[in-house]
Amino acid sequence: MALVDSSQDLSAEMEVDAFRRLFPLRFFERHLSESLRPDGRPLGKARDTIVNLGLVSSADGSALAKIGSTTMIAAIRMEVMTPSLDSPDEGCIAVEFHMPPICSPTVRPGRPADEAPVISKRLSDIISSCDMIDLKELCLVSGKAAWMGYLDIYCLDADGALFDAALLSAVAAFSNLQIPVVALNDNGRIVAINGGQEENASIREKEAVNKEKRKLTLKNIPFSLTCILHKKYILADPTAEEESIMDTLVTVVLDSSDQIVSFNKSGGNALAGSSAIKSCVELAKKRGKELKEILGEMDID
């Protein structure tokens, strides 16, 4: 009798899987009608989120962010540059988002993913527009030397809401950043002090230049939430499967004061009416509080 029941359960499970593959939209809509998603989440709930700091020993700052299965690792490398004539007292931040073939079956070796440059540009715009980092803090010697921060974000698993996970990993990496120690050498050039006695012995400090490692002061930290608009439904933090079936995406970015930094809609024909926009913003505020608690546990202000 137990064998018969087991066979029936297996047959029913196979039928559900087949229906899901053949009619994915109908499969999801049956769940949505009950205000539930196939993974068991309510429509407005984000996936479990994990953040770990300092995983890349060769970087000056790094972090791993995981939202559900979507996984990003961000690493920051600092280099001394000559500041521009327009901004002699400011450093720079360069952002690059990478999607290697390991992250998704849709990414082919030798062919860069279409999303990568788009996400890079959006991340760069958000980091600069929300004033999270005071670029004057990156100045070493006015008009002569400043820090150039290279932020590289690698997607290890692309299971939806890539921008949200990438932004979270970037914020966490900047919170982990330790600006290297530098000094002036005999030739008047700024060089990094790596701890080697022979190299350090040749450096004489002509003026105070970043004598010890320090952290950046982060303000107006941005948080984001991507939602799917489908008919009368709004789904927060979609998976890759949900994004492929219901393709109207809305991403809301808020700062630490819950002020809107960015509102982006991509794909699909669904209209983002005022009520839908308001609902997405409210969900983003709720998500922002959750992320603040996660980052607050690691003393990220």
Image: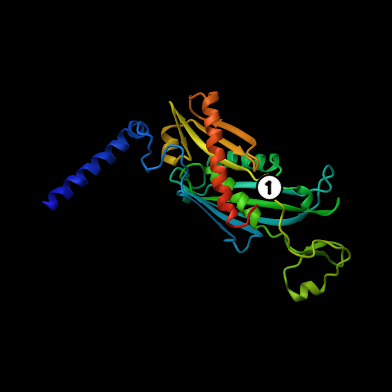
Residue 27 point in image, percent of width and height? 33, 34
Q: Residue at x 56, y 34 (%)?
A: 281
Query: Vertical placement of 215 versus 280: above or below?
Result: below
The correct choice, above or below, for 108 with respect to 211 in the image is above
Callout count: 1
Q: Amino acid at mark 1?
A: Ala
Query: Between residues 34 and 201, which one lies in front from this camera angle?
Result: 34
On the image, the x and y values in percent for residue 298 come to: 59, 57
Q: Is residue 166 above or below residue 243?
A: below
The image quadrant that residue 263 belongs to is top right
* Residue 252 in view here: yes
Extreme residue toward the left, this view? 1
In the foreground, 211 or 149:
211
Q: How is the image coloured?
A: rainbow
Rendered position, 55 above or below 280 = below
Q: At which x and y percent is residue 95?
A: 65, 47
| Quadrant of the rendered image containing residue 35 | top left
The answer to whether residue 98 shows anywhere in this view is no
- The residue where tag 1 is placed is 94
Point out residue 64 in the picture as x, y percentages from the top left corner: 55, 55
The local crowd at label 1, few if under 14, some if 14 to 19, many if 20 or more residues have their Cα within 10 Å, is some
Look at 81% across and 74% down and name the residue there: 201
Q: Residue at x 54, y 41 (%)?
A: 286
- Left or right for 186, reference 58: right
Q: Secondary structure at mark 1?
A: strand
